[in-house]
Each structure stands twice: as structure tokens, then as C-alpha cells.
Image (cartoon, rainbow, N blue to C red):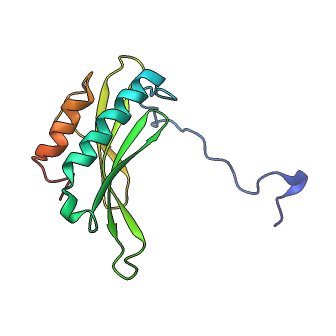
Amino acid sequence: MDWGPGGEWPWPIPTLHEGFSRPRFQEVWMTKLPEAVRGRVETRLSVYCEERIPDRVRHQVRLTYRIRGSSVTLIEQRPALMDPDNWVDIMVAQFRLREEDSRWVLYWADRNSRWHGYDDLEPSTGLDDLLEEVDRDPTGIFWG
């Protein structure tokens, strides 16, 4: 590819123009869960996932979670339609721990697996409040 004279990028780099502004408030997330918090989260979610799915249907559906940085993602897994030996992940909810106030914030995934803040619940100091809201699912966006 011809990068232009001197090897620079051939097109102008977009910059902010008048009328564009940066967000006024940007939430700051922890880069990593503190070990004590991570331990509590793993213990709580292991119990939650175990209790949520009855033994008799675990060959058809599983519930698990993943921790990445300060985000914890709740995931439903089901066998793939054309390949039942391969399990497919369905994102249910995400819990993020804010650094400024150590509160958990609830997120939901759209059909493209993009996360959006859940507006019907205030951030909470406890993960249980968010799990209760996911269980209630008054809007139908977590479990369908």
C-alpha cells in the first residue's frame, strides 16, 4: 500500500471540530477487582449459577460467569443447534465496579452483544441487589 510521501497515512486524520464535544461525565472503572472483592464475587456467583439451573436440565442449559478487569459477565450457555457438542454463549448481564465510589452498575446486552447501562436500578454497593433485579427481569431484557 502506498502510504503517501514520507510514509505517512494517506488520508487526513479526523479531529474534533466546532460543535463536537467530549462527554461531560465519564465513569471511571477499576482496572482490576481487588482480590478480596474478587473472592466474594466468585463465591456468590458460583452459588447463584448452581442454584439457578436445576440438575435435570444442565445437559440443555448452563449458567456461568467471567471476570475481566472490573467487569463480571453473567453468561447462559446452550448447545449449538447444528453442533450440540459445542456450547454457545448468550450474554445475560454485566456488573461493573466503579472506582470512584465502589458501586456496582448493571448493564444489559443488545442483540449485537453491545452493553448498555440499565436505567431502572441505581448503582449498588452490593452485587446481590443487581442479581435480584436480573432475577426479577421486569423489562424482559435479561432472560427474554
Q: Please tell me which residue is depicted at 30% across the width and 32% down the height of the picture.
A: 105
| Residue at the extreme top | 101
| Residue at the extreme bottom | 82
37, above or below 80, in the image: above
Residue 57: horizontal and vertical position, in percent? 21, 64
| Residue at the extreme right | 6
Left or right, residue 108 beside residue 134: right
Residue 106 in sight here: yes
Q: Please tell me which residue is depicted at 47% across the width and 26% down the height of the picture.
A: 30
Quarter of the image where one finds residue 123: top left
Residue 43: horizontal and vertical position, in percent? 34, 34
Q: Please tell me which residue is depicted at 19% across the width and 30% down the height of the picture.
A: 129
26, above or below 92, in the image: above
Q: Quadrant of the C terminus?
A: bottom left
Left or right, residue 79 beside residue 131: right
Residue 108: horizontal and vertical position, in percent? 28, 47
**What is the total number of numbered labels drawn onto the structure image?**
0
